[in-house]
Amino acid sequence: MTMRTLVFAIIAAAIVFPASAQDRPIQLKKAPGVDKVEANCQACHTLAYIPMNSPFLNAAGWDAEVTKMIKAYGAPIDDDDAKAIADYLKKNYGI
Amino acid sequence: MITRRHLLETAGAGAALAMSGLNSSLAKAAGVPLTPGVPDGVASIATMATLPGKKPLIQLADRPPNYEAPLEYLRTPITPNDQFFVRYHLADIPNVDAKTYKITVGGDGANGTAELTLDDLKKLPAVEVVAVNQCSGNRRGLSKPHVAGVEWGYGAMGCARWKGAKLKDVLDKAGLKKEAIEIFFAGADGPSFDKTPDFVKSIPVWKAVDDSTIVAYEMNGQPLPHWNGFPARIVVPGWTGTYWMKHVTAINALTKPLADFWMNPAYRIPVGKFPIRDRFLSQENATTTPITEMVVNSLITSHRDGDKVKVGKVTVSGQAWDGGYGIRSVEVSTDGGKTWTSAKLGDDLGRYAFRPWTFELSAKRGKNTVMVNATNKLGQAQVSELIFNGAGYHNNVMQNIALTAG
């Protein structure tokens, strides 16, 4: 083993990759429903996905996104929360 | 399935330390070099951030990690490992231990089963291929109208020299039945939540047994970076990144088409809209078909739209690539597409690689435009109008940038 590979091996052994890094905080617009968005959406992904996808989705577009998260990705969101989330997204990040 | 709880329990205190370290290493840049045309909201969340082992990349999302390369990182025909983009669908990404790592090979389309360690993989005859790895959604952010998804600019791609075993040789360890039609891949990463479909993919057998399709364990002469699939990933030259399974742990031969969210409805293009030769017929239906080979494309990497230059000779350069037929020519127009001049092509690193090109612009005082169009060896060229599709795939609209000389 050369010095270089030895050093590399030590560094490699020391690095532990995070299973899930703490998210960089994303400040969503303060408005009714934001608590439901924060409580549900970031269970699986950063809240950055919301501002990133704005402002171009219309009401039907945001409804489709919320439905996709529940139906396709299995997000365990009840009907009341789903409606509150969709309403929030349409009003604050829609067109 | 690997759950978050499981990972936290096994990773322990070291992971907690690393987590806080990663968080504090996030470097906010004053100006993030976003591609012009992405949705306005991208600017409010994008930041330059540094993952362990990487140079700063444009962070679009930290969980799951989605980071694209700024234009400057794409100036060389080989993209260095620490500058290579990072893309994950799902957020549970284990730190795979190379010592205990195994790939299982089997499926109902195989004669038997096999297990390969990393050493087993390295004992198979090694092949190298220089190939572009481009996210299917690269340039999604430029779709008009905008479509939902990760709003990538130009940088969800890179080109590397991949070394590994032929997938065909790996499949031979289990033996392919003649009834096999697709080869399935799964990786060690998974969803945060058990009801989310795990990210799995398949490719047709004919593509899997192509000599260029490999199980890669080296990238540019080094072990794969963690964020690009350590210790081994599938490399499907010519095809978009969705099939290049990272941290691959299972390779199964199937006698029936894989029925899964990630094959359908995800990663689909409309039938007949794009000039695609490689079709994935076992997955095709009347209206949609899986995205497969990349369309011919080019990128100006030396300059950005609106850059200031000096009057006189200005070298404009970039990359061109396609689905593996090879680049025949790159042409440049300085009059909005009326007349065209051939750019000089650089080193040919193989038909799946970035093909660098350069063009000497004689910049006049004031505004100069540079428009670029690549043509592949099938005669396919870039388009002047976007071929709109709901997922924002295959955007190969010719760039036309303005350079102001003074």
Image (cartoon, coloured by chain):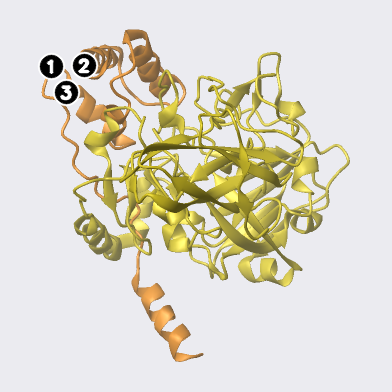
Chain colours: A orange, B yellow
Question: Distance from label 2 to label 3 (Cα)?
Answer: 7 Å
Q: Is residue B97 left or right of residue B31?
A: right
Subunit that carries the residue with mark 3: A
The amino acid pointed to by label 3 is Val
Pick the residue in front: B322 or B231.
B322
Q: Is residue B323 left or right of residue B101?
A: right
Tags 3 and 1 touching, CB below 8 Å: yes
Label 1: which residue?
A32
Say what secondary structure mark 2 lies in: helix
Q: Are marks 3 and 1 on the same chain?
A: yes
- The 10 Å Cα crowd at callout 2, few under 14, some 14 to 19, many 20 or more, is many
Question: Mark number for residue A34?
Answer: 3
Tags 2 and 3 touching, CB below 8 Å: yes
- The 10 Å Cα crowd at callout 1, few under 14, some 14 to 19, many 20 or more, is some
- The 10 Å Cα crowd at callout 3, few under 14, some 14 to 19, many 20 or more, is some
Question: Mark number for residue A88?
Answer: 2
Tags 1 and 2 touching, CB below 8 Å: yes
Say what secondary structure mark 3 lies in: helix
Q: Quadrant of residue A68?
A: top left
Q: Is residue B375 above or below residue A94?
A: below
Q: Is residue B168 left or right of residue B353?
A: right
Q: Is residue B203 above or below residue B250?
A: above
